[in-house]
Each structure stands twice: as structure tokens, then as C-alpha cells.
Amino acid sequence: MTPDQIVYRHSPGTRITHWVFFLAFLALISSGLQIFNAAPYLDASDKSNPARRVLSIDSTQDSQGVTTVFGHTFRTTGWLGFGDDGMGGRTDRAFPGWITIPAYQSLADGRRWHLFFAWVMAVCGIAYMISGFARGDLQELILRPADVPKILPMQLYYLRLRKEPPPHGKYNPLQKVAYTLVLFVFAPLLILTGLALSPSFDALFHPITVIFGGRQFARLWHFVLMLVLIGFFLTHISLVATQGVFNQLRSMITGRFRLGTHDGVGV
């Protein structure tokens, strides 16, 4: 294949699961923040323990939002602690209505939305893994020992400290690191910590909850893993922005991709 040649890079299954997964993840974040509002704090403990509080979002008597992280308090009025109530007003509330599903405060509805999109994301992930394995695409996505020496040169290329990237196929070594961690480490841990928060799951599989340090600690891990995946998506979006937005988006909408000088073809 030569540079500037347009190739068929992503199958319909890959494109559909990519966008459904992305939208489901956004909905999970939003509904998760709704659930967080019911108990706007995180404790590094097996039970609720203010002495081991890592994060809390609250408001003062004069309606000022405050966020405390590891004992350091910041004024966050209008963003966190006091802001949009989802119904046209303002109220004491950890995360504002414009970022939560539903916009109004409701723990029960937040849980329903969260569970629904958790299933959507799980089914989407399983479908992607199965179709990717059948096509042989999943094997290209996984980091292999031969890719490890190429990680640093690839990073130097992204930092503009190296003129050319190391030879690679459809996915470069840094992409493989990220996808391997997300698919086989972070996503499974996110699911398990989420299940550990369920009283029924805890009753049936209590040892799993114990492994995470108890339900409160599992809640902390769940929140941190959410931030990790948000970081992954933001990094992914920034790299797309620097590597040809139109070309990258077209490949995830139509499947067609215009090869660059150093791009692998893929399937």
C-alpha cells in the first residue's frame, strides 16, 4: 500500500460498537454522578468514616459550594456543591443538573439509568471482543512482547522528538498499551467494583467485596477507575485531533481511511 491510498480499515461491527460504547460510557458517567449526589463523599475505609475521607462535595450555610480533597478545601460554587438543580433553579447539590441523568435529583432513577447503560456497555463490549476475535482484529490490538521496545520510540515520535515512528501495523505500540489496559484491566475492575456496590451481589459474593476493602472502598475504586477511563478517552480524542480529525472520523463512520506515510493498513 502507498501513502494517500484510501483503504477499508474498520468493519461495520467495529464502527457500531465504537459509537454505542462511547455514548453508553457518557451516560454511565452522567447517571453515576447522579448516584454520587446521594452520598457526596468518598472514604478510604470499609465503612463510612469521616476520618478517612478522600473527597467530599458540600455546601456552606450561606449557599457556597465547597469541595474538599485530602483535607484541602476549595470554593466551587456554581460547579460543585451548589448549582443547577435540573429544574431551572439552584440548590445544594454535589454535581449540577446539567451534567447528570436525570437532571433532577433522584437516586432511584439514577440507578435505573446506570444499570440500563451498564448492560448496553457490557453487551457492546462482548460483541466487540467476539467480532474482533473472529476477524483477527483483536489480536492486533493486544500488546505483545515484540511491541515493548517500540513504546519509547513511539512516545518520542508523539512528542516531536523523533522524526519517524517505529514500524507498526494497524495499531501502534502506545495504542496497544492503552487498549490492552482498558479491555483487560480497567474495564473488568470497573465492572467488579460496580457489582461490589450492590447489596445483593455483596451477599452472594462477599469475598470479592472484601478484596476491594469493603463497599465504601469499592466505591472509591469505582470512582477512580471512572476518572482513569475519562483520561483515556480525553487522550484518545486529543490524539485524533492531532492525527487528522477528518480522516480519523471518516474511518469510524464509513470505514474508509486515507493512509499516511507511516500508517499500517489494518483490516
Image (cartoon, rainbow, N blue to C red):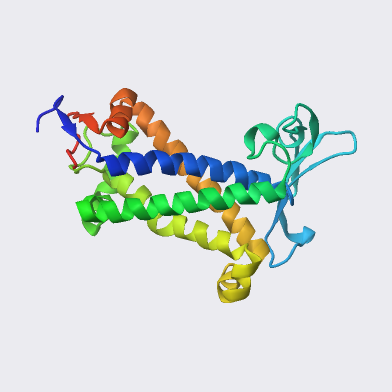
Residue 1 appears left or right of 55: left
- Quadrant that contains the N terminus: top left
Residue 191 appears left or right of 238: right
Q: Residue 90 is drawn in which quadrant?
A: top right
Q: Residue at x 52, y 40 (%)?
A: 26
Residue 155 appears left or right of 230: left
Which residue lies most toward the left here?
1
Question: Is residue 83 among the parts visible in the rendering?
Answer: yes
Q: Is residue 14 above or below residue 188?
A: above
Q: Nearer the viewer, residue 194 or 75?
A: 194
The spot of residue 145 in percent (x, y) is 24, 58
The spot of residue 65 in percent (x, y) is 78, 36
Which residue lies most toward the right here?
61
Q: Nearer the viewer, residue 150 or 186?
A: 186
Q: Is residue 37 above or below residue 202?
A: above
- Quadrant that contains the C terminus: top left
Q: Residue at x 65, y 67 (%)?
A: 199
Residue 251 appears left or right of 220: left
Q: Residue 203 is drawn in which quadrant?
A: bottom right
Q: Residue 205 is drawn in which quadrant?
A: bottom right
Q: Residue at x 49, y 44 (%)?
A: 25
Question: Is residue 142 among the parts visible in the rendering?
Answer: no
The spot of residue 42 in percent (x, y) is 69, 54
Q: How many marks?
A: 0
Q: Is residue 19 above or below residue 3?
A: below
The spot of residue 213 in percent (x, y) is 62, 68
